[in-house]
Amino acid sequence: MNGDQDPVRLPEPAGHAVPDGAVPSDPAAVELAARGASAAEARARLVASRARIVASGDEARRRLQRDVHDGPQQRLVHAVIALKMARNTVERGSEAAELVEEALANVERATSELRDIVHGILPRSLGYGGLSTGMRSLVADVSLPVDVRVVTPRLPTAVETTAYVVVAEAMTNAVKHSRAQMVYLDVGIEGETLVVEIRDDGVGGAESGIGTGVIGLFDRVDAAGGSLTVVSPPGQGTTVRAELPVRPGEG
Amino acid sequence: MMIIDVDRPLRIVIGEDDVLLREGIARILADAGMDVVARCGDADEMLSKALDYLPDVLVADVQMPPCKEDDGLRAALELRSREPGVGVLILSQFCEPDFVMDLVGQRPEGVGYLLKERVGDIDVFVDAITRVAAGGSALDPQVVGRMLGRGGQSGPLRLLTPRERAVLAAMAEGKSNLGVAQSLFTSQASVEKHVTAIFRKLGIAPAETDHRRVQAVLAYLRADDHR
């Protein structure tokens, strides 16, 4: 990271530092210490509730995928099969044959589009094989060349999902705005931290005018107890870096 | 490797929790002269029946009860490891190359992965089952297309002509030279020339059998780094 550029970082909450083991000797100090302790408790409750909100959002998405799989997607598959079989029974060149052909084309497209939408929400391969398969799945759909390095074991679902969402958003921005030739994706473990870095060789300048997608990322990463930085000097490409505690709740 | 006695109908076990689809598949296969020995609605029952009956092919959905996660796929993988002689054809709503890679593992023999709607292309479906029963492989063209898309922008896959990419895709699906030639409306000799060129451009050692060939192509597509 270029030392001249200040990474964009969420401010730490203001708080009163109470030295460990300090024994307050007057009522004002006792009151201060008590307020500090309850502020710390309040912050811990806030962090926990934010994590719960994020987790319940992810769970809702997974339920949506399952509902779509069991409901509309299944019905569309039936429709495709029935129409294909109908195609064999109608008279060639007849009006019925044309209508069947048209219906089949539309239903096949609907099936394919629905599959892509569901896949875009959260691909199955993320839950199935973790970050290495989830990242490969994501990168397959990116229209820029991506150099992928993912070295990580399976991690708690919340961590993997957050990492996935960060990469997905960063990739989207790289494709839309960066005019890059190449994107570099690095995912690895450093001690107790999952480090995710997405770097492109494009035009940079992302620090001014961060879109709502990235703001959502800051919130999400913060709720996971991690940190997100965006370094994007004009003309020098963009680097998005997220650090997430491998054990959520201990960040 | 299975040796097919042409007078004996292929024995099939079906695992699919969608009742209508399960019965539809059973009817299609029976019409094609196959013997459906068991039909199951959940993964545990499916595995136990498959181990009992040792069919030529197990046709299984990925997502099945009891957990409705990927129980069907896991049961199929379990069967593969315990009874390598039984062919497995997965029917799925998911176009996920990673499911395919896990299924194929080190052995593309006797393995197939088709998108569910392919069942409606009766000839394709029946041909896939027959190929898998004979120890070959049958991978859905759409899933193969996704695999090819990964290496598409960078690496040696860029060096292939559109025709060569089409031949590579057909090879990855498990087709023989004859099958490739038929699906691309060209001659076998022409396919053989393309195959040689493809292997040379990608730096893959030429393979003696169709199985080794699918394995080589999938291993190539699986590797992340092609710079």
Image (cartoon, coloured by chain):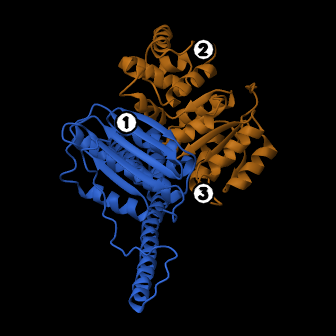
Rendered orange, the chain in question is B
Eyeballing the image, is B78 above or below B184?
Answer: below
For badge 3, the amino acid type reads Val
Check disc 2 and report the residue beneath it.
Answer: B207
Nearer the observer: mark 2 or 1; the answer is 1
Q: In this rendering, does residue B55 appear at all?
A: no
Q: Nearer the viewer, residue B8 or A206?
A: A206
For badge 1, the amino acid type reads Tyr
**Visual hue assigned to chain A:** blue
Q: CA distance from mark 1 to mark 3?
A: 46 Å
Question: Outermost residue toward the right?
Answer: B52
Q: In this rendering, does residue A179 appear at all?
A: yes
Residue B150: quarter of image = top left
Check disc 3 and report the residue beneath it.
Answer: B19
Q: Secondary structure at mark 1?
A: strand
Check disc 1 and report the residue beneath it.
Answer: A184
For badge 2, the amino acid type reads Ala
Q: Chain of mark 1?
A: A
Q: Position of residue B39 (x, y in %)?
A: 69, 51
Residue B119 left/right relative to A214: right
Q: CA distance from mark 2 to mark 1?
A: 34 Å
Q: Residues within 10 Å of mark 2 (few under 14, many from 20)?
A: some
